[in-house]
Amino acid sequence: MTVRVGVIGGGQLARMMIAPAVELGLDLRVLAEADGMSARLAATAVGDYRDLETVRAFARDVDVVTFDHEHVPQRVLRALVADGVQVHPGPDALQYAQDKLVMRARLTELGVPQPDWAAVRDADQLQRFVDDHGGGAVVKTPRGGYDGKGVRVVHGGDEAADWFAALADGDALLAEELVPFTRELAQQVARRHSGEMVAYPVVETVQRDGVCAEVIAPAPGVGGRLAELAEGIGRTIAEGVGVTGMLAVELFETDDERILVNELAMRPHNSGHWSQDGAVTGQFEQHLRAVADLPLGGTEPREDWTVMINILGGPADGALEDRLAQAMTAHPSAKIHTYGKSPRPGRKVGHVNVAGADLDDVVYVARAAAARFL
Amino acid sequence: MTVRVGVIGGGQLARMMIAPAVELGLDLRVLAEADGMSARLAATAVGDYRDLETVRAFARDVDVVTFDHEHVPQRVLRALVADGVQVHPGPDALQYAQDKLVMRARLTELGVPQPDWAAVRDADQLQRFVDDHGGGAVVKTPRGGYDGKGVRVVHGGDEAADWFAALADGDALLAEELVPFTRELAQQVARRHSGEMVAYPVVETVQRDGVCAEVIAPAPGVGGRLAELAEGIGRTIAEGVGVTGMLAVELFETDDERILVNELAMRPHNSGHWSQDGAVTGQFEQHLRAVADLPLGGTEPREDWTVMINILGGPADGALEDRLAQAMTAHPSAKIHTYGKSPRPGRKVGHVNVAGADLDDVVYVARAAAARFL
C-alpha cells in the first residue's frame, strides 16, 4: 500500500519533503496556504489551516498528517485526533513547540538544563526578574514568534509595556536570563511513535538578526562529552514530550562548557538542512520515515564537514534562478537548493550545502556560492 | 525566470528527475504515456509521443524538451526543431541511439574501438560474417531493442531467419563479432550545447538475462590507463555525435585490456543510478543542468565505493512499499529508490544504493537490502 502523507503548510519545508517522498514511494499531499507556494508541485488543496472543516477535508484523503510549521491550532489538532486521524507530531507534543511557557515548565520537570525563567504578568514582575538576573533579561511572547520575532532584550520592566498591554486576561510573557553564551548549537533527534529514536551529530549555528545564517556540521571543537550531553538532552526531550518526527533543540553553549536549551522545533529545521547532502539520511527523508512509521535511517555524516549557508533575501533584480548559472560555474561542488519564492529582503529563499574534508575550504566555497545569489 | 523542462515519457527516469528539478527550481513537466506512470507527480499531459500534434502541444508550454527514452520518432523530433523548439539531445544526436547501424558507422568514422560489425541483409551475408568470426556472432535489430530484447547470439546464418523475413525493403540487421569480454563497464559523460563536458568515473556493470543487475562505482581494479581510455572514448563520442545531456557508453573489457563500445544511451542510464547517492552531482541533476543549459556539476565520487542493485520484479505478493519497513530496519545505510510501479517478473521496479569504504561490505548490504523486496 502506498502511504499518503498529508503536510499542512506549503512552505520550503514541505517542498523539500517532495524529493525523498518520490524516492520512498510515499504519496505526498500538501494543504497549501495559497496558490504558488514553495511546495506547489505537491499541493492537492489550498485553504486556511485554522479552519477545522478545511483541515478535516484534507485529512480525509491521507493516512497521516504532518506539518510544514507549528501554527495549526490545538482545537483543530485535537478534533483531527478525535476523528481518528494519525497526526504526527500529535497535539500533546506540539503544544511544547507552540507555547514557550508550557515548554519551559516541561523542561523544568524533565530536569533539562535551561536558562533561568519565569512567567511574568506585568512590568513589576519583569522588573523583579531583571533585578534578580544582573539587570537584563530576554522577554518572549510565548506564542507565534519565529526567526527573532516576539523576542526582545530588556533592561527594565517597562520595556515590554506594549506586550503586557496586549496580553489577554490570565496570560503571561516569558522572561529568561540573558545567557552569556559563546556560541549556539543545535541537536536534532528523530523519533517514531514506537519510541525508536536516532540522533544527528550536534551542529553549530550562526544567527544574524535573529535568523539562522550558517550551520557547520558537526559543530567544530565539540569533544565527546559535549556531543554526548547534547545528544542526551535531545533524546530526553524527544521522549519527554512524546514527539513523532524530527525534533530540533536549539542550544546555548557557555564558556564553562554547559549547554542550555533555547528553543524547540518539531519538524525539519533550518539547522538540519546540511543533512540533505551531508548525512546518510537527510532530515526531510527522516521526518517522512518517522511520521509514516517507517524505520529510521542512518544519521552518520558523509564527509568530515558540511556547511549550510542560507540565501537570505535573494537578488534585488530578478529571480534566484537567474543566478544559478554563475553560481554553478564558479562552484561545481556546491549543492544549491531553491525554494521557488520571490526575493524579498531578509526572506529565506534558498540555501547552499557544501561538504568536504577541509573546513576552511568548505566554509569559503559555501559562502561564496551563496553570495552569488545576493 | 523559471526554466520549464518538458520530459517526453513518464517512466522512472523522468520520475527521478523530479527531486533535482525541485531543488534547482526548474519547472519539470512530463508528457506521460498514460495515467499513473512512474513520473505521475510531474505529469502535465498524457498522450502518444509518436503523434506530432500531441508532442507539439506539449512542447508549446516548455522552454526545452528532453526525454525519458529514445523512442520519439525522427519525424516528430525534426518537426519540433523546425518549429524552433529547443530539443536536447537533438535529432542529429539521437539517431545514433535509435539506430545501431547508424551508430556503428559513426563510431567507425570516429575511430572508436568497437567489435567488428557488418550490416547483413540476408542469411547468406550473416553466414559469411559468422564464418569470418570464429563461427559465432551477435545479431541485433538496429531499432527498438532494449534490455536484451532484439539481441540474439547465433552460430549460423539461418538462426535469424525470422528477423530477416520481417525486414522492410532496403533494411538490414546488425551483425557483431562475439567479443570474449571479461566484464562490462559503462562510461557516462554529460555535455552541454556549448560543448562543456564532464565525465563520471567508469563503472562496472553486471547484467543478468540482458538486464542491468548491479553496478559498482568506480569499476574495481581499473587503473589510470583504462580509466583514461574509457573517459576518452566517452568524450570522443559525446563530441562526435553532438549529444546534449547525459550519454552512457556501455563497454566490453577484454582480457588484453582493450575496451570496445557495445551500446549508447542518450539520457540518464541505469549504470548511473549510483551517482544519485554516490557522486557530488547525481546523473538526473546533471542531465537537467545540461539540457537547461546550466553549468555542469562535480562528478567526484563521495565515498570510496558505491554499489547499485536493481530491484527486478518486486514482491510476488503486494507492493514494493510493503517491504520498505523490513528493508530499512535491517539496513539503515541503504538508500532505497522506488519507481511507483506494480511488481511484475523481471520488471525494474526500484533500486538500492549503498556507499562506503569497504567494497565487500557495501556489496553485501546493497544485495541484502534489495533482496528484501523479492
Image (cartoon, coloured by chain):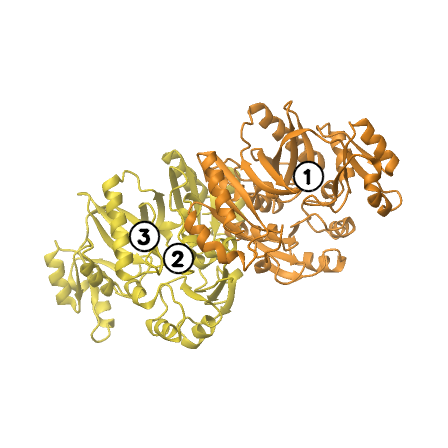
Chain colours: A orange, B yellow
**Type of amino acid at the residue the image marks with label 3:** Asp
Quick check: A186 left or right of A305?
Answer: right
- The mark lying in front, picked from 1 and 3, is 1
Q: Are marks 1 and 3 on the same chain?
A: no
Chain for mark 1? A
Mark 1 and mark 2 on one chain: no
In this rendering, would A196 be left or right of A321?
right
- Provide the secondary structure element on which disc 1 rests: strand
Q: Secondary structure at mark 2?
A: helix
Three-letter code for the amino acid on which mark 1 is drawn: Leu
Parent chain of label 2:
B
Q: CA distance from mark 1 to mark 3?
A: 53 Å
Q: Which residue is mark 3?
A: B209
Q: Position of residue A88 (x, y in %)?
A: 67, 46
Residue A103 lies left or right of residue B89; in this view the side is: right
Question: Can you identify the residue that label 1 sits on?
Answer: A264
User: Are discs 3 and 2 less than 8 Å apart at CB?
Assistant: no
Mark 3 nearby-residue class (10 Å; few <14, some 14–19, many ≥20): few
On whether disc 3 and disc 2 are found on a single subunit, the reply is yes
The number of callouts visible is 3
Q: Is residue A188 above or below residue B13?
A: above
Q: Nearer the viewer, mark 1 or mark 2?
A: 2
As rendered, which of B27 and A191 lies closer to the eye?
B27
Tell me if residue A1 can be seen.
no
Front of the two marks 3 and 2: 2
Give the number of the disc on residue B290. Answer: 2
Residue at 57% of width from left, 60% of height from top?
A41
Residue at 52%, 55% in the rendered image = B22
Q: CA distance from mark 3 to mark 2?
A: 32 Å
